[in-house]
Image (spheres, grey):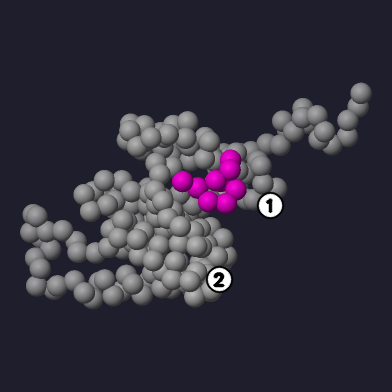
């Protein structure tokens, strides 16, 4: 199940949790994107040097989703998802925020949902404990950290696959790869782990 969605080619929304609620939110965000496209003034000169696209940035989208999740929780009909929003804020600075089914929202230099919140976060915090640390990472270094996290998660969850999606957000837009694969993995190391398989003393 692919759980990353691109919003207006400027932000990425990642979903953890219930698939049907994720599909509902995906349709809702598609409708929101269409509304945003219609509300743009056609008389604006998009080719002007100082022209800026008038649409929701990642910060606005994060706040919108926080209000939506909080309202659904107050209606006793929560959407059972953990949502991550990544992109750029109004000043073209990197933004990463999290919203849960209760409408609780916060930002951090590194975030994860589900199993990744327990196993991937410590790895990411070694490289991006603060916003200053995160700003020092190159694109290649950040991607390598994510790949290392995916490798750990693959080995730790017996139900997982070795394929995943990865998105990189820059000022030029969103680059989404939906069929990345871990390098050839081998479970041969497991034979050296005490308690795995038949043991001889």
Q: Which numbered circle lies on residue 159?
A: 1
Q: Indicate yes or no whether the magenta region holds residue 107.
A: no
- Which residue does the numbered mark 2 point to in the structure image? 20
Question: Tag 1: Cα neighbours inside 10 Å, few (<14), some, or many (≥20)?
Answer: few
Residue drawn at x 11%, y 59% as measured from the top left: 51
Q: Is residue 66 visible?
A: yes
Q: Quadrant of the C terminus?
A: top right
Q: Please tell me how many numbered marks the rendered image carries.
A: 2
Residue lying furthest front: 74
Q: Is residue 4 visible?
A: no
Of the two numbered discs 1 and 2 in the rendering, the one whose residue sits closer to the viewer: 2
Residue 108 locus on image (x, y percent)? 40, 44
Which residues, given as a range, are shown in magenta?
A: 111-119
Q: Vertical placement of 20 versus 152: above or below?
A: below
Residue 171 locus on image (x, y percent)? 25, 49
Residue lying furthest right: 201
Q: Does residue 39 appear left or right of residue 153 in this picture?
A: left
Q: Which numbered circle lies on residue 8?
A: none
Residue 153 locus on image (x, y percent)? 60, 43
User: Considering the numbered disc 1 on the image, is that residue within a helix, a strand or a loop?
Assistant: loop
Front-lying residue, 154 or 186: 154
User: Considering the numbered disc 2 on the image, is that residue within a helix, a strand or a loop?
Assistant: helix
């Amino acid at each position: 199940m692919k759980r990353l969605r691109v919003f207006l080619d400027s932000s990425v929304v990642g979903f953890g949790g219930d698939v049907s609620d994720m599909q509902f939110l995906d349709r809702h965000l598609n409708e929101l994107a269409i509304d945003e496209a219609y509300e743009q003034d056609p008389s604006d000169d998009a080719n002007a040097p100082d022209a800026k696209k008038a649409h929701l940035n990642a910060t606005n989208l994060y706040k919108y989703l926080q209000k939506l999740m909080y309202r659904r929780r107050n209606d006793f009909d929560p959407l059972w998802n953990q949502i991550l929003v990544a992109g750029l804020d109004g000043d073209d600075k990197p933004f990463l925020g999290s919203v849960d089914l209760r409408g609780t929202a916060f930002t951090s230099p590194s975030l994860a949902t589900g199993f990744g919140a327990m196993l991937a976060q410590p790895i990411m915090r070694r490289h991006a404990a603060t916003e200053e640390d995160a700003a020092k990472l190159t694109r290649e270094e950040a991607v390598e950290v994510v790949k290392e996290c995916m490798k750990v998660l693959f080995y730790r969850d017996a139900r997982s696959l070795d394929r995943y999606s990865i998105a990189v957000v820059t000022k030029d837009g969103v680059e989404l790869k939906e069929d990345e694969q871990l390098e050839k993995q081998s479970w041969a190391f497991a034979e050296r782990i005490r308690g795995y398989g038949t043991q001889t003393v």
